[in-house]
Image (cartoon, rainbow, N blue to C red):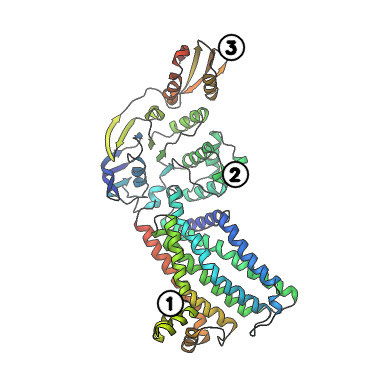
Amino acid sequence: MIEFQSVSKTFQKRAVLDDISLSFDAGARVALVGSNGAGKTTLIRCLLGEYVCNGNVRVGGVDPRADRQGVLARIGFVPQLPPPLKIPVGELINYSANLCNSDPKHMEEVAEQLGLSMDSIRNQPFVKLSGGQKQKLLIGIALGRESDVLVMDEPAANLDPESRKIFFSLLSERTQNSVMLMSSHRIDEIAALVNRVVELDRGQVVLDDHVADSIDPSAIQDCNLSLSRDEEALAKSLAEWGFTNGDGLNWSGTVAGPDRLRFLGMMSRYAGLISSLELK
Amino acid sequence: MLKSLSHTARLEFTESIRARWFLVYALVFGAVMVLLLASGLTESRVMGFTGLSRTLTMYIQICMAILPIFVLITMVRSVAGDREAGVLEYMLALPVSLGAWYWGKLLGRYVTVFMPVFLAVVVAVIWAAIRGFDVPWTEFAFSTGLLISLTWCFLGIGMLISTIAKTSDVAQGAAFTVWLVLLLFLDLILLGAMVREQLPHEVVVGIALLNPMQVFRTASMLVFDPELILMGPAAHVILDAMGRTGFLIYGFVYPAVFGTLSAYAGFLFFRRGDLQ
């Protein structure tokens, strides 16, 4: 569905993409990883037809520079940095829905599923929303429209654990016949959501690997945790993950399947306090 | 295409009227008109102008001085500023054609910048009607037409600069330079150059005819002062050659064409290169 053939891009004689060749078929869930300046955003912008590049980029056999509207009608996009738009949230949704021939109510429903209260923010300028609210709204716009390619740049970076659970569940509903391309500089953020990892370094593909995860992206796992002593910082972190405790030492809660690595990463900082930890 | 264009124009209008520059811009034009009306200018008679004609004449002259620089400075931040802020990355990832986005943005911005200028004139007309002055409808229509043309001209120039410039700071510098050059080639300044350098008449008249600010100045004065008593030498030569009607048509058409060609050149630059 998506083809990059010998794609190169230079800025002021510096190669940002160097002869990239990649192909993604329907069903591909791709993690595009790499450090800052590796070329992830440039590759995405070439895919969106925003950059002129050498080589060929095709989406469903069509050049995004030649038929922008046709190609972009198939792509839902969530940027890493939300645009500083002063227009009210409702106007942004209506504009996007009109261009995408979609129902604005569906976009709002997705945003509300992620925990956004549309009634209270509809007339607020987009730029005045918090980072998390902006991210939820842009995800709502991207997922609330018809598209068979989803391109997301650090999509879950500003989401709280509860919203991440819902976000992962929403993504799991649409992975069968579509391509999902997620960019992140940390693989643990998105590892469990993908079936392929492409790593870029200085504009070149240094790793292209298929991965398999037995867990359903929409799965929720119960977690029981016992601590050797009470620790305020850990208690605060667990509360943010939605965990509850009976006596200060025993905690229970749920973790979204794709968030296991991230949860365990957080817990690793308090490894000395853990008496037992069960995920099932 | 038309649907996307109208949606983009509406979005640009909604976005622009929330910007701080628009508040300052609208206040300046409102304040200018209020000061003109409050100063009793309408009731004074100087050099043959009286009533609303005098107020409109003064207003048009002030517009010529401040409208181009206001429009240029705010417009040049448009594409260059959006590029820097990451607005283009998101907005151009939506399924909108570049033509619909570019021209829609221009139209939306046009309505935004012309609205306060026109509303100030409407306020003057209402005020004159209330005070019992005759409203010079023909002059009002000509003046409005010339303001429409001048605004479009500088929006087009601003859009061109904005698409070429890599950053909004560079764009602002270029806009200021363009405005300064056009200001230096106004009729009265040309007169000094002509006397000092003994330039051929054809060169001076040619420059005066090519400078959209000078064309606006001459045409707007011609609306109220058919003999161009108040104008410099180039205007007299032009008037002799083209006649009043001919020049009024030229005064409306030339800046509009200049603005359209500038905007189209900007579109070609915009479409050709990296969008973000």
- Amino acid type at circle 1 is Leu
Q: Earlier in the sequence, mark 3 or mark 2?
A: 2
| Residue B63 left/right relative to A70 | right
CA gap, disc 3 to disc 2?
42 Å
- Amino acid type at circle 3 is Asp
Q: Based on the displayed image, in which of its 4 quarters is residue A206 positioned? A: top left
Q: Do callouts 3 and 1 point to residues on the same chain?
A: no
Return the residue at label 2: A122
Residue A225: percent from left, percent from top: 50, 14
Q: Do callouts 1 and 2 point to residues on the same chain?
A: no
Looking at the picture, does residue B168 appear above or below residue B263?
above
CA gap, disc 3 to disc 1?
84 Å
State yes or no: discs 3 and 2 in contact (Cβ < 8 Å).
Answer: no
Q: Do callouts 3 and 2 point to residues on the same chain?
A: yes
Q: What element does badge 3 sit on?
A: loop
Looking at the picture, does residue A109 appear above or below residue B46?
above
Q: What element does badge 1 sit on?
A: helix
Return the residue at label 1: B210
Q: Specify the label residue A247 is tagged with.
A: 3
